[in-house]
Image (tube, rainbow, N blue to C red):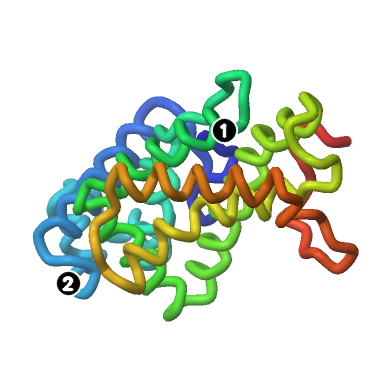
């Protein structure tokens, strides 16, 4: 799911800055593979990437900032489907999420980001922004379904997508078991049935995740 959100206090310029960024993020991923979040340090990332540690501190401030940007960068490869029907959109998205987190390194990454958010307020802000923006973007699927008459008009798009993602994060972070294709299918089927039944109707006191893309 692509998003306009980038690193803490950073953009995605081209040229040398972009090459620096990619070298650093590749080094972070390799360090997480080797030693996990507990062993991750700015100095190790600097040594592996060949980027001066002062540059890392200036741009990312801490390892929490690095892992949050890495998650943002990698998850941009998860496509937002538009198949013409919501049940199929949900299945395609669930399969993409399953494939993304089916890699052990990606499961370790989300664990690292959640751990970072518990320790660092800046990381917590980035993590919340990360999920809020993806809920808004993926909500386009639900808004299209409402326009097609597949769902009740009062359906809350963010609640639908939150329900779709919840089983994956429960599996990774709580029960600590791998995600698989069966989980993707069951999550998509359950959310589609619940949405059709009006389970995700918008409430007057429902939290807002920000404006929809394209809103004035």
Q: Where in the figure is residue 6, as x and y percent of width and height?
A: 52, 45
Task: Report whether residue 66 is seen.
Answer: yes
* SS at circle 2: helix
Mark 1 — residue? 87
Q: Is 4 placed above or below 89 here? A: below
- Residue 64: name its quadrant: bottom left
Tell which of 150 and 30 is nearer to you: 150
Decide: is 3 above or below 31: above
Residue 94: x, y in percent? 44, 41
Q: Name the residue: 40% across, 56% down.
A: 168
Q: Which residue is at a point 40% across and 42% down the rendered structure image?
A: 185
Of badges 2 and 1, nearer the viewer stands 1
Seen in the picture, residue 109 relative to 102 is either above or below; the reply is below
Q: What secondary structure is marked by label 1? A: helix
List the single residue furthest toward the left.
34
First-in-chain label (2 vs 1): 2
Write down the quadrant of residue 78 in the picture: top left
Task: From the viewer's perspective, tell me whether residue 168 is left or right of residue 108.
Answer: right
Q: Quadrant of the C terminus?
A: top right
Percent of width and height locating residue 125: 57, 66
Q: Residues within 10 Å of mark 1 (few under 14, many from 20)?
A: some
Of the numbered discs in the image, which one, if any, rests on residue 23?
none
Q: Is residue 63 visible?
A: no
Q: Is residue 96 left or right of residue 191?
A: left
Of 179 and 150, the residue lying toward us: 150
Residue 144 point in image, percent of width and height = 73, 28
In this rendering, position of residue 158 left or right of residue 6: right
Quarter of the view holding residue 109:
bottom left
| Label 2 crowd bin: few (<14), some (14–19), many (20+), radius 10 Å | few
What residue sits right under mark 2 in the picture? 39
| Measured Cα–Cα span from mark 2 to mark 1 | 42 Å
């Amino acid at each position: 799911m692509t998003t306009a959100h980038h690193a803490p206090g950073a953009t995605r310029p081209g040229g040398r800055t972009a090459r620096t960024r990619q070298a650093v993020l590749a080094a972070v991923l390799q360090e997480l593979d080797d030693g996990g979040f507990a062993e991750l340090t700015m100095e190790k990332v600097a040594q592996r990437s060949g980027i001066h540690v002062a540059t890392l501190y200036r741009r990312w401030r801490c390892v929490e900032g690095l892992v949050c940007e890495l998650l943002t960068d990698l998850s941009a490869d998860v496509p937002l489907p538009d198949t013409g029907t919501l049940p199929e959109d949900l299945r395609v998205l669930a399969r993409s999420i399953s494939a993304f987190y089916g890699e052990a390194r990606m499961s370790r990454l989300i664990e690292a980001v959640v751990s970072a958010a518990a320790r660092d307020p800046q990381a917590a802000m980035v993590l919340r922004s990360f999920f809020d923006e993806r809920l808004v973007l993926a909500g386009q699927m639900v808004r299209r379904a409402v326009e097609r008459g597949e769902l009740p008009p009062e359906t809350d798009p963010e609640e639908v997508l939150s329900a779709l993602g919840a089983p994956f994060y429960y599996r990774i972070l709580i029960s600590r078991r791998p995600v698989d294709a069966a989980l993707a299918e069951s999550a998509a089927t359950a959310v589609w049935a619940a949405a059709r039944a009006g389970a995700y109707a918008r409430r007057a006191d429902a939290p807002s995740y920000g404006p929809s893309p394209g809103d004035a």
